Image (cartoon, rainbow, N blue to C red):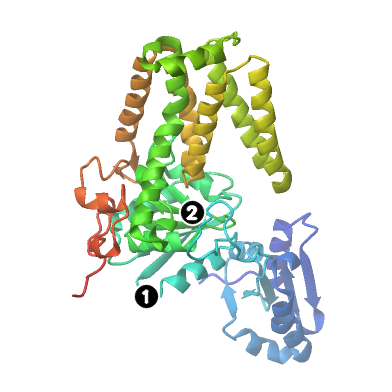
Amino acid sequence: MKKNPPEQLTLEHILHEFDQCADLNHRTFPELETDIVYFPHSVDNTLFIQEILEPFSRIQLSEVDRMLRQTQFVQINDPKQAVVGILSGKVAVFHGGIIYLLDVSGPEARSVQSSETETVIAGPHDAFVESASTNLSLIRRRLKSPHLKIRRYDVGEISKTTVYVLYVERIVNMQLVEDLEQRIQTIETDELNDGGKLTQFIEDNPASVFPQFLTTERPDVAVSKLAAGRVIVIVENSPTVISAPSSFFEFFSSPDDYYQRWALGTALRLMRFLALLITVTFTAMYVSVTTFHYEMIPEALLITLAESRNRVPFPPVYEALLMEIMIELLREAGARLPSKIGQTIGIVGGIVIGQAAVQAGLTSNVLIIAVASSAIASFVIPSYMMSASLRLIRFVIIILAGIWGNMGLVIGISLIVIHLSGLTSLGTSYVTPIAPMKLRDWKDVFIRAPFSMLRTRPSQTETPNPVRQKNRK
């Protein structure tokens, strides 16, 4: 059996690994023949005093071995484990040629607050934070079941980021879990610090503009996905968790749909699908009609439109692209500036630039209405990632409509449908329940039926336990 290395060599090895790390603390207790190594900013100062400083200041050399046999001190034989432990906020204790690790980690963490990107009117208002342990507790608090299983992985050659895979045993399809874990284990990168990066490593079609995994900051949404038979991924230092597999229609669902009456939830969901059509086609329809199809405009409106476009020197497609780019610039400026200034620049900038553009003859009043309607419709979509994808697609549809008119509009929409039909999420169809057709899932996709009718889990998860609830008569 290989013996542990001598104390001095082991300690020198650890200190050599952390050479030129000014934030590393190395403290020595000569009378106890003990050394400790740790990062002070990664440990809880109160725990450090209680578990290390006070006990070591009260004991004699003969009592050190007995104290280190307590359960909180974990003996290790590999110096590499000591390096990882120290980086994780643990204290390495060196005594008698043996290394012990004591977990007193306590990094600074943001308190649980409400989500700024997924706001709801009704329902809970807590959101995930950057601490994975806090996020796990938020899920455990809502899902008190021993069947909730959690697996851990370290991703990143340098960052060693902790990634947790969560699923509910007996509900989830284990093939989905194994597929997801295999993709995570095959990631080869230096660092991984956010769930958004992780999705780009494990998605089926990296070249697609559409997000293939749903990300959320809300614990209630994550728990509902787990109960539906999906798999949840939590990344350390990321306030968003990943749900897999996902479908295109999931991105148009909001927690508010379930916290309000079913009729109101259904109306809101249908309104979002209407917003999808408006944000993708409204500006492109203006370009198509004013370029090729004046016969589609009512006579009374045609006179108004002709007067509005009388002073505009550009073709409708250039005019539309100019205003769409300006709207995107205002949106990005509002997002990057401080919140109080950002709101002002969005409102004032839109009004001033829009009015000035009309008076200068650079655009027509009708186009301003079309562009503003498309922008407002994109805000209705709950998922920011999906909203951003649709805004990008809108530019392509506008160009096609400017080249071929209504035919270009039809071609663009057809290409989108074909592309969506070919996408998969963790090996499952991205447009479930349309392809494959699953009519029983429609009552929780295009509408939000009463809970008494939502008895089964989504077919996309291929769960071995499809029954979600049983109604008592």
- Quick one: quadrant of the C terminus? bottom left
Label 1 crowding class (10 Å Cα cut-off): few <14, some 14-19, many 20+?
few
Whether residue 245 is visible: no
Q: Which residue is mark 1?
A: 146
| Picture layout, residue 406 above or below residue 439 | above
Where is residue 165, by image quadrant?
bottom left
Where is residue 308, by image quadrant?
top right
**Type of the residue with mark 2:** Thr
Number of numbered labels in the structure image:
2
**Type of the residue with mark 1:** Pro
Which residue lies at the image location 49% right of the left edge and 58% below the top edge?
A: 234
Residue at far front of view: 300
Q: Earlier in the sequence, mark 1 or mark 2?
A: 1
Whether residue 52 is visible: yes
Which residue lies at the image location 44% right of the left edge and 41% below the top edge?
A: 211
350 horizontally vs 185: left or right:
right
Element type where label 2 sits in the image = strand
453 horizontally vs 410: left or right:
left
Residue 379, percent from left and from top: 52, 41
Distance between mark 1 and mark 2 Cα atoms:
24 Å
Q: Which residue is mark 2?
A: 216
